[in-house]
Amino acid sequence: MHVTSNHPLEAGLTHDSRLITAYRGTRPDVTPVWFMRQAGRSLPEYRALRVGTQMLDACLTPELASEITLQPVRRHGVDAGIFFSDIVVPLKQVGVDVEIVPGRGPVLGKAVRTPADVAELIAHDPAQLEDTLAPIVEAVGLTVAELGSTPLIGFAGAPFTLAAYLVEGGPSKDHIHARTMMHAEPEAWAALMRWTAQVTGIFLRTQILAGASAAQLFDSWAGSLSRADYEAHVAPASRLALEYVHDIRYTVATPEGRETRDLSVVHFGVGTGEILKPMHEVGADVVGVDYRIPLDEASRRLGGTVPVQGNIDPALLAAPWEVLEQHVREIHARGLSAPSHVMNLGHGVPPETDPAVLTRIVELVHSL
């Protein structure tokens, strides 16, 4: 599918931005930088805006979601906005009983533990999402109108992470019930993964068609898996989820004429150093790297041919500046081993982070 003529990529606003240039594997003159969870609790303006509003209500109120997305771009001068939402929004919109409990995270009304539970869940048709995501379309539209030439990244949770929440009933340290189901009830597990792939794929596609310039798939819990389990029981569903955006195209003017390009896709997981290559092979253009593995080693494991994103340790955001500066400079140097590099954190911004530190990192990265 070709994006519309007013899409930021097609309209010539974002296709040659630092971020999209790096995502396409060409190193721009200045390393682009943005932060996972840059929109959120570290910003006083976010906390003021959220008073009296539940998380999922904020995600589904277009004006709120747009304003929260824009706040860190204005404050920090980052090279991209990341759409403010939550990976469980499509679950809620398709009819699943889920809430985000402050201090805990997503909590399901009922854990999905048996084949009968899976059958009940997947009776919710993912296609009905297309009739419930109007607030997302509106929020993206409001946001890209303000961002102009700064690209917006659309995001969604990977099928395994969504499935893990569903099976565990909420956050879990080891995802033991989910990992058990994939072996004890392989048919039910496969059906659950197909369903979560469809739900999250539609959610991601909606954001892109509404105006986001790149896509990022978060597999927050994939680090709990062995490589064999990932490849056999998870990778096929992640591949299916990304198929929802792989047919999206845009056209740019070049000295030779008009060129049709594919959308750039980033795949990120936590604790996934042992499965970076299969994560790339599900259909990603860029691989996000967490803080547990050096960036040049990650690039080596990816064959030295894949753009990388990461991987500042969030713990160092509260360290003395000279310590953090050395850390950022080292990551920048290690990033030179890849075709291109987008500076980011190796996970999300901790809520207690001083926003001035993030702004200072942006200035440093842009100066290197």
Image (cartoon, rainbow, N blue to C red):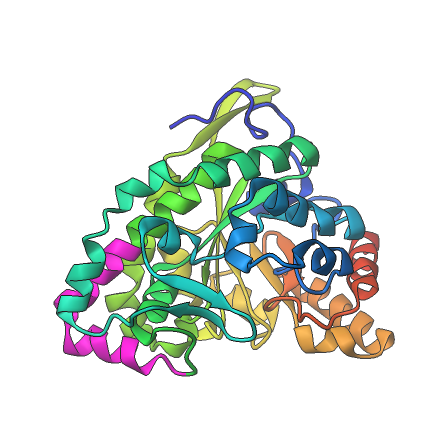
Q: Nearer the viewer, residue 29 or 118?
A: 118
Q: Residue at x 61, y 34 (%)?
A: 142
> Where is residue 19 shown, x and y percent of the image?
64, 45
On the rendered structure, is 335 left or right of 365? left
Q: Is residue 164 above or below residue 363?
A: below
Overall secondary structure of the magenta section: helix
Q: Bounds of the magenta span?
A: 174-196
**Image quadrant of residue 42?**
bottom right
> Where is residue 105 shown, x and y percent of the image?
49, 70
Q: Residue at x 46, y 72 (%)?
A: 272
Q: Nearer the viewer, residue 295 or 345?
A: 345
**Image quadrant of residue 40?**
bottom right
- Can residue 78 be seen by looking at this rendering? yes
**Count the marks: how many?**
0
> Where is residue 254 shown, x and y percent of the image?
59, 22
- Can residue 263 be seen by looking at this rendering? no
Q: Residue at x 48, y 73 (%)?
A: 273
**Image quadrant of residue 70?**
top right
Residue 242 highlighted magenta (yes or no): no
Image quarter where the C terminus lies is bottom right
Q: Nearer the viewer, residue 154 or 171?
A: 171
Residue 180 highlighted magenta (yes or no): yes
